Image (spheres, rainbow, N blue to C red):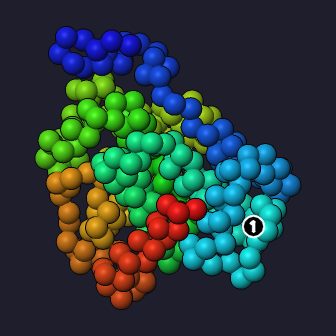
Amino acid sequence: MVPQENGRWDAKSLPWAHLRLPPFPQVAVRVLQLVNNENVQLHQLSDLVSSDPAFSSEVLTIANSVLYSPRFPSSSILQAIAVLGANHLQGLCLTVAARAYLGKSLNQPSMRAIWRHNVASALIAEQIAAAGLLDKDIAFTNGMMHDIGRLALAVVRPKEYAQLLASHSGSPASILEGERELFGWDHCEAGRQLIADWRLPREFGSIVGDHHSLRPGGEIREMAELTRLSCRMADAAGFPAFPGCLVTPYQDLLEELPAHERRIFASGLEPLARDIEQKIDVMETA
């Protein structure tokens, strides 16, 4: 696919496949599909993940770490699912897959920042959801997936995308416009399309596509707002997605939470940042 003379990729006039995105690890896509099937059996998930030894090894390492702190160490994927639950496996597989998706480009500071931002957003969303009686596993997955389109665009043209992030203002609107100029798609549109291609539940696509919208609608509103807030809290905790990101003061963000959810962050910003850093370290060394 050749860009036009002005450097813009005329993506909207061509099939999405022409962007030549690397395939997301199929084991992760299948896990996401299966855990959303109410009739799924644990052995189906176990057999699926175990079929990829490298993937299975990473999941087990993370499952037995401080990230989830299981009561009893797991020596098999089946044991890990039984202890953690199927939806925890969903989050683990997505986390491992997102890192694998970036591949060697993860060595670039800007690409690594995007991945770390996603993990931080997922961990914060999980905490808020648990305190607010929402589904914390779905919140974690949405946190990991909210910028999956950004990861995809970064993989397509990593150097140009890194320059885009470094040269634009910290305004999300500015970044979105820059993405449209460079690719013909912004990362919300790219993420929505990826999820459709992977045949994942539509609500994931809605949240990924609308997490920058100020008025997300319908059934996704509460989870989309949680995703957007956790994203901003990740920025404040020192895990911004791009240089020059406009950071809202942490205390102002806490004021957006109901009192009972705010209490889980009572220890302050620094302990939260340390906790996230420790958990990301586990995933980066798995």
Q: Is residue 39 above or below residue 102?
A: below
Q: Quadrant of residue 173?
A: top left
Residue pictured at 23% horizontal, 47% vertical: 172
Q: Quadrant of residue 64?
A: bottom right
Given the image, on which type of amino acid does mark 1 rest? Ala
Q: Secondary structure at mark 1?
A: helix
Q: Residues within 10 Å of mark 1 (few under 14, many from 20)?
A: many
Residue occupied by mark 1 = 80
Residue 136 shown left or right of residue 7 in the figure: right
Observer-nearest of 246 and 154: 154
Asked if residue 225 can be seen in this view, the reply is no
Viewport quadrant of the C terminus: bottom right
Q: Is residue 235 above or below residue 15?
A: below
Residue pictured at 21% horizontal, 37% vertical: 164
Q: Is residue 125 above or below residue 141?
A: below
Residue pictured at 43% horizontal, 22% vertical: 19
How many numbered circles are shown? Answer: 1
Q: Position of residue 194 (x, y in %)?
A: 51, 34
Residue pictured at 21% horizontal, 34% vertical: 178
Q: Position of residue 165 (x, y in %)?
A: 22, 43
Asked if residue 73 can be seen in this view, the reply is yes
Observer-nearest of 209 and 166: 166
